[in-house]
C-alpha cells in the first residue's frame, strides 16, 4: 500500500509534466515551421519589376460633420459614401458632387461604425449607444430612414465595427465587450456569438469568397483571429503585433490578410502558411495605423496613420511607394471604391477626402 502511494504522482506533478510536454511539442512545431521559413517575401519580390505608382490626386473634400469622422463606407453603386462621426450624425454623401444627400441623427455621440448593405438600400450604424441601428434608404421624404429605423444588435459595451456578410438579411458586429456577433436584421435575433478575444474587438472583415463563411477580427488584445461563421469558433490566430490591432483586411485572393496596429506596423499573414510573411513599416513611421485597405489587384496596401497621412505600400517588396498628405488630424479610415477607381479617406479633422 505504501509502495502504491509512493508511485502515484500528485495531480500537481501530473499537470506539470503535461505542461512541460505541451511546451516541448510547441517548440517542435515552431522548429518545423521555421524550416519552411527559409526566404522572405521581399527577397523573392526583388526579381519583380518595381511598380510605377499612379499619381493619386485629391479630387473632392466632403465637409459637413462638426466633429471627428470615425468611419466611412462606399455604397455598392460606387458613387455614394456613408460616414459616421463623433458629432452623433450619419451622413450619406454623393462623392461625385461632394454634396450631402441625407443626414441621420443617432441617439448618442461617437458613432464608431457604419456600413452599407450589399443592395445599397440600407445602412447600419452604431457606437457608444452599444447598439447597431439599421436605416432603410430610398423611401419617400427626408425623414423616412429615421422613422423606419430598426435596432438590430445590442452589445454590453460600445459597438466598434459592423458589416453585412454578403446579404441584407444578416449583420456582423464587433464590440468593446470583446465579442463578435451575427444577427438577423429582420427579427434582431442573435444567430451566433464569437468569443475568444481577451479585450475590445476593434475591426472586422469578411473573407472574399461567395460562401461568406469565414471572417477575421482584430482587437486590443493584439490578436488577429480568423473565425468559422457556422461553428462560432476561431480557426486561426496571429499574435505578432505589439499593440492594439485597429484594422484587418483580407487580401483579394482570400489567401492572406493584412492588419494595422498602434505599434505603427502593418503586417501580412499568410493563412496557408499560418504565419506572418511581411511587415510594412519604417523607422521614421512612429505613429499608429488606424486603417488598412487593399488595391483591387492586391499589389498595393493602403494605410491610414495617426500622423495625418495615408500611405501606399508595395505589398510584395514591403516598400512605401506613395504618401497622401492633406488631412489635418489622424486618418481614421481608408477605403477603396468597389471598382478601385477612387480612394476615400476619413479623418478626425471632420472631413472626408476622395483621391483618384
Image (cartoon, rainbow, N blue to C red):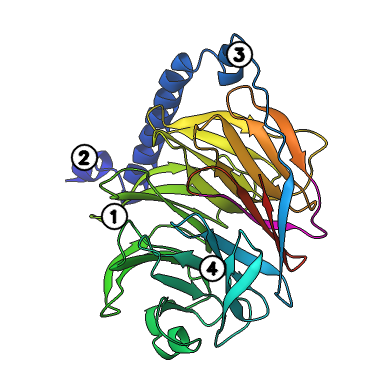
Residue 229, disc: 1
In the picture, measured across the screen, residue 73 lies left or right of residue 140, that is: right
Give the residue at mark 4: 113
User: In terms of depth relative to the viewer, which is nearer, 215 or 51?
Assistant: 51
From which residue to which does the magenta span run?
325-337
Give the mark nearer the N terminus: 2 vs 3: 2
User: In terms of depth relative to the viewer, which is nearer, 268 or 206?
Assistant: 206
Q: Is residue 329 magenta?
A: yes
Give the residue at mark 2: 3
Give the mark nearer the N terminus: 4 vs 2: 2
Q: In what quadrant of the picture does the C terminus appear?
A: top right
Q: Where is residue 252 drawn, in percent x and y? A: 44, 37
Q: Please determine whether, in this image, residue 13 is positioned above or below residue 143.
A: above
Q: Is residue 59 magenta?
A: no
Give the mark nearer the N terminus: 3 vs 4: 3
Report if the CB atoms under discs 4 and 2 are less than 8 Å apart.
no
- Residue 161 seen in the current view: no
Q: Where is residue 258 drawn, in percent x and y? A: 53, 40
Q: Quadrant of residue 196?
A: bottom left
Q: Please determine whether, in this image, residue 356 is positioned above or below residue 142.
A: above
- Local secondary structure at mark 3: helix
Instruction: Give me the residue at 29% from left, 43% from top.
Output: 9
Q: Please determine whether, in this image, residue 122 is positioned above or below residue 147.
A: above
Amino acid at each position: 500500500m505504501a509502495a502504491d502511494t509512493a508511485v502515484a504522482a500528485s495531480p500537481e506533478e501530473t499537470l506539470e509534466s503535461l505542461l512541460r510536454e505541451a511546451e516541448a511539442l510547441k517548440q517542435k512545431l515552431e522548429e518545423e515551421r521555421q524550416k519552411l521559413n527559409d526566404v522572405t517575401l521581399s527577397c523573392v519580390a526583388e526579381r519583380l519589376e518595381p511598380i510605377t505608382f499612379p499619381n493619386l490626386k485629391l479630387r473632392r473634400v466632403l465637409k459637413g460633420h462638426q466633429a471627428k469622422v470615425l468611419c466611412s463606407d462606399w455604397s455598392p453603386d460606387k458613387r455614394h459614401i456613408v460616414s459616421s462621426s463623433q458629432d452623433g450624425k450619419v451622413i450619406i454623401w454623393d462623392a461625385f458632387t461632394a454634396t450631402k444627400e441625407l443626414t441621420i441623427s443617432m441617439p448618442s455621440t461617437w458613432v464608431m461604425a457604419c456600413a452599407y448593405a450589399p443592395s445599397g438600400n440600407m445602412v447600419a450604424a452604431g457606437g457608444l449607444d452599444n447598439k447597431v441601428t439599421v436605416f432603410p434608404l430610398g423611401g419617400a421624404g427626408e425623414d423616412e430612414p429615421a422613422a423606419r429605423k430598426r435596432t438590430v444588435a445590442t452589445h454590453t459595451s460600445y459597438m466598434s465595427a459592423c458589416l453585412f456578410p454578403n446579404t441584407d438579411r444578416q449583420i456582423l458586429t464587433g464590440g468593446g465587450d470583446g465579442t463578435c456577433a451575427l444577427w438577423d436584421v429582420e427579427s434582431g435575433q442573435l444567430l451566433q456569438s464569437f468569443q475568444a478575444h481577451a479585450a475590445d474587438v476593434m475591426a472586422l472583415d469578411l473573407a472574399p469568397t461567395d460562401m461568406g463563411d469565414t471572417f477575421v477580427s482584430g482587437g486590443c488584445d493584439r490578436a488577429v483571429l480568423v473565425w468559422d461563421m457556422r461553428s462560432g469558433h476561431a480557426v486561426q490566430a496571429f499574435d505578432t503585433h505589439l499593440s492594439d490591432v485597429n484594422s484587418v483586411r483580407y487580401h483579394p485572393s482570400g489567401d492572406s490578410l493584412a492588419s494595422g496596429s498602434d505599434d505603427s506596423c502593418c503586417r501580412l499573414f499568410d493563412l496557408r502558411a499560418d504565419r506572418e510573411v511581411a511587415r510594412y513599416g519604417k523607422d521614421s513611421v512612429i505613429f499608429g495605423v488606424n486603417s488598412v485597405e487593399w488595391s483591387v489587384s492586391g499589389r498595393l496596401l493602403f494605410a491610414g496613420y495617426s500622423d495625418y497621412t495615408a500611405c501606399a505600400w508595395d505589398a510584395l517588396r514591403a516598400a512605401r511607394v506613395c504618401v497622401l498628405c492633406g488631412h489635418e488630424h489622424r486618418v481614421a479610415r481608408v477605403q477603396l471604391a468597389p471598382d478601385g477607381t477612387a480612394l476615400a479617406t476619413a479623418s478626425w479633422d471632420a472631413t472626408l477626402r476622395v483621391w483618384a
